[in-house]
Image (cartoon, rainbow, N blue to C red):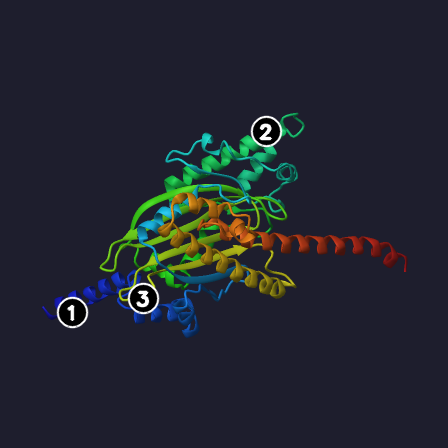
Amino acid sequence: MLTRNQYLLCTLLVCLGTSSALAQASMADFQQALREKGAFNESDFAALELNQPVVRLIPATDKREVAVTGLVNINASAEEFLRSYRDSMMRKNNSAILEIGSFGSSPALADLNGLTLEPGDIDDLKECIVGDCDIKLSAPMIERFRKEIDWAAPDYQLRVTNLFKEMLVAYIKDYRARGEAALIEYNDKPDSINLASEHRALTSAAGYVNSFLVDTKSELQLVEETLVWSKIKFGLKPVISINHISIYKRNSVAGPQVLVASKQIYANHYFNAFLALTAFVNVPGATNGSFLVYENRSRADGLEGPFGKLKRGVVEKKAREGLRGIIAQSKASLEGSVLTASTVELSAYESDGWGHRLFGGIRPLLWLMVLSALIALLVLGRRRADSVNVAKRKTLKPESVKS
């Protein structure tokens, strides 16, 4: 009987701890959790009292990874947050979003009717081999382009586009059927990248929002999920990506709690893995409404090498600034939607200000836009430097032989 009572007591304590994770029992508990898991401090909490967003870097052990977390208080309900998120998720409200769509419950080629391949990407596929390709693909995908495309055919560009779409649809069907086991391995470089391993590393990393997804999954009810594809414009080249977006919800004494997870399962350039988490948190007794807590982690090419430390410093700085802008706009958009009509909210999205054009809305893909643009420029700089070094070696080689 004593053992049974001890077991019941432990179970009760675990349940209470789990239940209070997303719905903190008090502001003190909320702040303590943010200190321990989110690297926030007293100055951040003071900024929150002044209705200012706060952003912090999250320590990352992998050199390819950049991680940031952000926090802001909002005067809006969970329902208003979800409505705003759903409305913005598929709306092409930004000039940098070239194309966007989603996959149905039974993925089909028609889901990708609006997707186009860049001529430069098609030309790159012509020279693509396993271990040396400018497009992120698995080895079987690369081999299919080599074997199934007649590059001398007058309509080879259309054939390449159709094959690319066919492979994406087959990939998404497999992913819907088998989940993470279907995630591909990138073989565009000598060192392969296993997406399942990359995502396990991101989801297992310590973090305030990440702990909700890992430790309290049984407490969170999956209410909606969708697979969104997009083509986004950058300074170097557009990126085609596919994100798996999951919305979880649970009810508590403090009101509905919401967690949105956006996991990238494919990108044709730059990114190896990407995870964006947003939590809507109610705290009993809080004087400044509810809170949005963001965590964004990404692993990308171009952050290693001799200038890796310098490049990381640039990217981390811009990452903080980018997330701060996203959070500020999220707050303005949500609180504006409470006070104004939807037509006024739409006019804010169409503002001519660069901040609105870049950060309009709470779409998880906006983070991808910010960081990818920076990494694209860094990769371009690295390639130019490599080209210069190769040219120098070719120029110096005859002289060294002659001497």
Q: Secondary structure at mark 3?
A: loop
Q: Nearer the viewer, mark 2 or mark 1?
A: 2
Q: Which residue is mark 3?
A: 287
- Check disc 3 and give the amino acid type: Thr
CA separation, marks 2 and 1?
67 Å
- Residue 174: percent from left, percent from top: 41, 39
Q: Are marks 3 and 1 in contact (CB under 8 Å)?
A: no
| Residue 138 appears in the rendering | no
CA separation, marks 3 and 2?
58 Å
Residue drawn at the location 63% of the way across and 61% of the way down: 305
- Residue 265: percent from left, percent from top: 46, 46
Quadrant containing the N terminus is: bottom left
Q: Which residue is mark 2?
A: 158
Vertical order, 308 against 229 (above or below) = below
Q: Which residue is mark 1?
A: 6
Q: Nearer the viewer, residue 62 or 232?
A: 232
Left/right of residue 288 with respect to residue 254 in the rendered view: right
